[in-house]
Image (cartoon, rainbow, N blue to C red):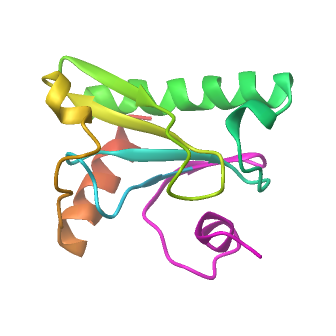
């Protein structure tokens, strides 16, 4: 059964896409920890990040790095935090989270509920910095 991320890749579910190529997709988390929280996924549906072959995993990190650089230019922060949790959706993904403090990447905190307008504005701002 296709995951929610596979449905985003196929265009069955809309997403605020930041960047994509033939292998990877980056899009905004619609319930972010902080504004600018981005998810990076392989288009191929693979559940566990350490099941991804070495070449693809390396390329995924290079793709994520490009997004993180643009994200840091867009959202005032000290760092872009990187997390791989992998329990909430059975499709490998990397979280890129703008951080001022360690609390910004605490997945136990309540998620934000930004408006579609705010998400569109954030998406467009990040894309300008890629």
Query: Which residue is at 63% across, 23% downward?
Result: 62
Query: Which residue is at 65% across, 74% downward?
Result: 7
Relative image position of residue 58 (x, y in whole percent): 73, 21
Asked whether, in this view, residue 113 is left or right of residue 38, the answer is left
Relative image position of residue 81 (x, y in whole percent): 34, 25
Query: Which residue is at 66% across, 69% downward?
Result: 3
Point out the image quarter for the N terminus: bottom right
Relative image position of residue 96 (x, y in whole percent): 40, 35
Q: Is residue 3 visible?
A: yes
Magenta segment:
1-25
Q: Answer whether residue 9 is magenta in the image.
A: yes
Query: Which residue is at 80% across, 35% downward?
Result: 52
Identify whether 124 is placed above or below 119. Answer: above
| Residue 15 or residue 103, whichever sits in front | 103
Q: Residue furthest bottom?
A: 12
Where, by quadrant of the figure, is residue 34 drawn? top left
Q: Residue furthest top?
A: 78
């Amino acid at each position: 059964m296709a995951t929610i991320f596979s449905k985003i890749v196929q265009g069955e579910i809309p997403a605020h896409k930041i960047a994509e190529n033939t292998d990877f997709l980056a899009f905004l988390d619609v319930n972010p920890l902080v504004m600018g929280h981005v998810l990076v996924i392989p288009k191929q549906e693979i559940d566990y990040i350490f099941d991804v072959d070495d070449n693809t995993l390396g390329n995924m990190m290079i793709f994520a790095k490009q997004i993180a650089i643009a994200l840091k230019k867009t959202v005032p922060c000290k760092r872009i935090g990187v997390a791989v949790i992998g329990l909430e959706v059975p499709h490998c993904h990397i979280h890129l989270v703008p951080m001022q403090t360690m609390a910004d990447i605490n997945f136990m905190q309540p998620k934000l509920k930004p408006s579609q307008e705010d998400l569109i504005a954030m998406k467009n701002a990040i894309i300008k910095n890629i």
